Image (spheres, rainbow, N blue to C red):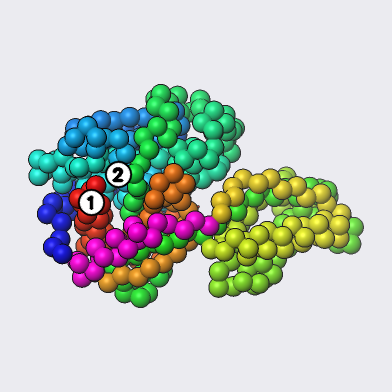
Amino acid sequence: MSLSSLSLDGEQLLSQIHTLGAIGADTTIGGRTRIALTDAEKAGRDQVVQWMHELQLEVRIDRIGNIFGILPAATEAGNQRPLMMGSHIDTVRNAGALDGCYGVLAGLAVARAYRAAGVLPQRAIVIGAFTNEEGVRYQPDMMGSLVYAGGLAADEALDTIGTDGTRLGDELARIGYAGDMAPGSLVPHEYIELHIEQGPVLEAEGQLIGVVENLQGISWQKVTVQGTANHAGTTPTRLRHDAGYVAAAIVAFLREQVVGAAPDTTLATTGSLRFEPDVINVIPRKAIFTVDLRDPDEGRLRAAEKRLADFLVGIAEREGVKINTERLVRFEPVVFDAGLADEIEASAKRFGFSHRRMTSGAGHDAQMIARIAPSAMIFVPSRGGISHNPREHTDDAQLIQGAQVLLDVVQRRLAAA
Ligand code: HGY
Ligand code: MN
Ligand code: MN
C-alpha cells in the first residue's frame, strides 16, 4: 500500500515546538515551568489557541479548560464522531520541551497538512490540549481528560484545592479558560496520542517508533507521619518519636521490600518530602511525603500497596508515631485498542521505520480517553531515557518521523471512515 498522500510540514512542527518550549523558560537551572493554570501556562494556552486560529480551526473550551481545535469534515455526517488527537501543554517544574507539547503540535501539523492540500477530511479532526495532565499542583493527574471521559465530575474537579491552597475553578477563571462546553460532548470516534517515550527502551534497542499497547497502573498517596519534636542533643534514641527517621525508613522499605518483591515491574517513587519544623537541631515532629507506585499488572500493584500499608502499621507502633495516608490517584492499568495498534505498526512498516510494541510507563491522557473511545499511542525515542528534566531530547528527524506516522495513520483511519 502506498504512503499517505498529504505531506507533513516538519520544519513548522519543529519551529512551534521550539516557540512553545520558550514559554515559561527557567533561566536558572534551564528548562521551562508551565504548571497547570499558572500565568506561564496561560501564555502557552494562548499561543496554541492562536496557532489553531491560524489554521482556521473552530476553537472550543470545555468547563475544565480542555482546549479543542476542530477541522470540520467534508460532509455534515462526518462531523458527528470526530477523530481526536492531542495531549497536554502543562508541565512539571523545570521540564523538557516535548512532554505533551509534541502530541498537541503534531496534531496541528496533521490539520495543517489537510489545509495545505486544500482538502477536508472525511471525518472531523479534533486536536485536544487537556488540562492539568501532570497533576503537580492539583491532583489527580490526567485530570482534564479524566473529566472529559466522565471519570470525575467537572464540578468536583473545579472545587479541587491545590498544593498551594488555590481552588482550581478560581484559577481557571482567572486565566480566562473556564469554558462552557460540556466535557465529553464531542465524542471521539477514536483517539491517537503521539508522545515521547520518556524512557530508555526505544533508544537502547535502536527503534524509531513505539507501538504502545498498554499503560501501567498508577497509585499516588500522600503520607503524613506525626511524631514528637524534641532536642537533637538531649533525647536518647530509644525515647524518640522521630517523624524524620520513620519517613526515611518508609522510603527505604519501598525500594527494598516493595520494589524488591517485583523488581522488573513495580516502581516506587517519593518525589516530594518535607519535615516540620525543618531545622537542624530539632527531631522532626512531622513528615509529609508522597508515594507514587506503578505496575502494569493490577494484582502486583495491589500487592505493593498492601505491603506498604502493612509496614506503616508496624512502624507506627514501633516508633510511637501516628501515620495517616491520603489517596491522591488510583488508575488501573489500561489496554489500548488492538486495531489502532496494528494500524500504527503497519504505518511504521510502510515507512520502513524500526518499531516495537511496548507498555507506557508514564500516565497519559490516552488512558482516560480509552474509557470512551478506541485509543492508542505512538512513541518516539527519548535520548538517554530522560524526561521531566530540561535535558529531555528527541532528534528532529525522529520527531518528524513520529508525526509522519501520525499523519499516515490518521489518513488511513479517515479513508476507512
Ligand atoms: O505521572 C505521569 O506519569 C504523567 O507524567 N502525569
Ligand atoms: Mn505527558
Ligand atoms: Mn509528564
The answer to whether residue 59 is magenta is no
Give me the residue at 35% from left, 64% from top. 211
Between the C-alphas of marks 1 and 2, the distance is 12 Å
244 over 352 or under it: above or below: above
Q: Is residue 150 left or right of residue 197?
A: right
| Above or below for 60 versus 9 | above
Residue extent of the magenta highlight: 333-352
x and y percentages locating residue 15 in the rendered image: 21, 48
Up the image or down, 407 lies above or below 188; here it is below
Q: Position of residue 156 (x, y in %)?
A: 57, 31
**For the residue marked with disc 2, what is the amino acid?**
Leu
- Looking at the image, residue 130 lies above or below residue 195: above
The label number, if any, that marks residue 416 in the structure image: 1
Q: Label 2 belongs to which residue?
A: 83
Query: What is the x, y in percent for residue 277?
Result: 73, 45
Quarter of the image for residue 355 reads bottom left
Along the line of sight, which residue is nearer the eye, 372 or 218?
A: 372
Q: Does dot 1 land on a helix, a strand or a loop?
A: loop
On the rendered structure, is 109 left or right of 365?
A: left
Residue located 35% across and 65% down the image:
210
Q: Residue at x 22, y 32 (%)?
A: 76
Inspect this view and state whether residue 254 appears. Answer: no
Q: Majority secondary structure of the magenta segment?
A: helix
Residue at 62% over, 45% down: 328
Name the residue type under label 1.
Ala
Between residue 331 and residue 120, name the one nearer to us: 120
Q: Is residue 74 visible?
A: yes
**Within 8 Å: ligand 2 and the Cβ of disc 1?**
no
